[in-house]
Image: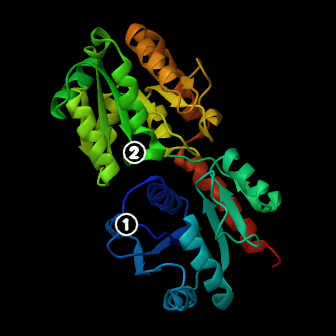
Amino acid sequence: MKVLHILRSKGIGGAEKYVLNLALALKEIGVESEFAGIKDGWLYRQMLNNGFKVHSLRMKGYFDLASIFRLARILNDGQFNLVHANLMRASFYAKWAVKFAGTRLVMTAHSTNTHKRFSKKHQIIAVSNAVKDNLVAHGFDEDKVHVVLNGVPEVGRVESIDVQRQLRRTLGADDKLTFLMVARVFKDKGHDLMVSALEQLEAGKLAKLQVVVVGPASTEWAQDLKNRSQKLGLPIRWVGQVDQPKNYYQASDILLLPSRREAISLTLLEACSAGLGIIASRTGGIPEVIKHCQNGFLFESENVSELTLAIEQAVDFPDDFNLYGQGALKTFSDGFSIQRNAQQTVLVYQGACNENA
């Protein structure tokens, strides 16, 4: 089977990592992948660096007719069995291009507010039950929406406390209880809620912890938040974008995921695979992975008081969160490997290829 993956994006995020991880896992089981996207994008470079054939496709706005016809030519010339589009813009261009190329189409919906630009005629992968519920609520045929839960390569637990301390020194972090956020810094991910929660902590507890934030912070909103946290003297280290954050997971104790909106975060799954304790908002697909006080601590989305309480609990009872981390690692092992994700995705591909054949 030969698949063309499409996504239009410049930066790095969950959808970009999803495509890269999936293509690598598909390669292991004999599925050939190529990629089409903008040349100055992170994913284009990563696919090229990992040995995949890539095609430049600008997809400027939603009225780029040249990109539709170019995509159709790529599909015809490459004799692809299927095109796999991710996010709304790529899905929009793909659904028009396949009309000319006759190629089968599968689209992946990554968000709980996704429905525009997607085709109700073609097969859709939803990365969580919450995403499927949203699509069905907007009139999509539930038989055409397939839940394939996200999967990630395993990060692995840190070997020992000594190794963890060494990693912290290498990364310039202090040897304190370390909370980690891995996400692009923007409002949906709740970085401002984290800052507000730290403001509410008493000084004694605040002195025992640090927060490491990994992810691009290029917007005015992000810069304002960084400036606010620095003026307050909060123990937050803003790292910026990191392509391979494995060492940050292994140097940390607890993942913070205070999202306002989330499907199933790849960051959450990576943290589970590293055995981190989890503090996450009860929103979207997160409760499909985290069960309160079993493999993590859930709080109501946007409730800063509950988030503050969760952080206090982690400071006062770190052994409880170590147990949550063990539960999170088991959760990952039981159902969120990238190999399982690839195998289930191939089943959707096969169904799409056989549809009305």
Name the side, left or right, on which 354 lies relative to 166.
Answer: right
Residue 310 appears in view: yes
Q: Which residue is mark 1?
A: 10
Whether pointer 1 and pointer 2 mark residues with C-beta atoms closer than 8 Å, the reply is no
Q: Which residue is mark 2?
A: 183
Marker disc for residue 351: none
Residue at point 40%, 77% (across, down) = 54
Q: Position of residue 258 (x, y in %)?
A: 48, 34
Question: Residue 340, relative to residue 140: is it above or below?
Answer: above
Name the side, left or right, on which 106 lies relative to 56.
Answer: right
Query: Along the line of sight, which residue is nearer the eye, 324 or 176?
Result: 176
Q: Residues within 10 Å of mark 1 (few under 14, many from 20)?
A: some
How many numbered circles are shown? 2
Residue at point 49%, 15% (across, down) = 323
Kindly identify the amino acid type of the residue bearing the numbered disc 1: Lys
Residue at point 69%, 63% (across, down) = 124
What kind of element bears circle 1?
loop
Residue at point 31%, 38% (across, down) = 213
- Name the image quarter holding residue 210: top left
Question: Residue 73, relative to residue 176: is it above or below?
Answer: below
Name the side, left or right, on which 338 lies relative to 160.
Answer: right
Q: Position of residue 79 (x, y in %)?
A: 58, 85
What kind of element bears circle 2?
loop
Quadrant for the C terminus in the image: bottom right
Q: Position of residue 269 (x, y in %)?
A: 50, 39
Residue 243 appears in view: no
Kindly identify the amino acid type of the residue bearing the numbered disc 2: Ala
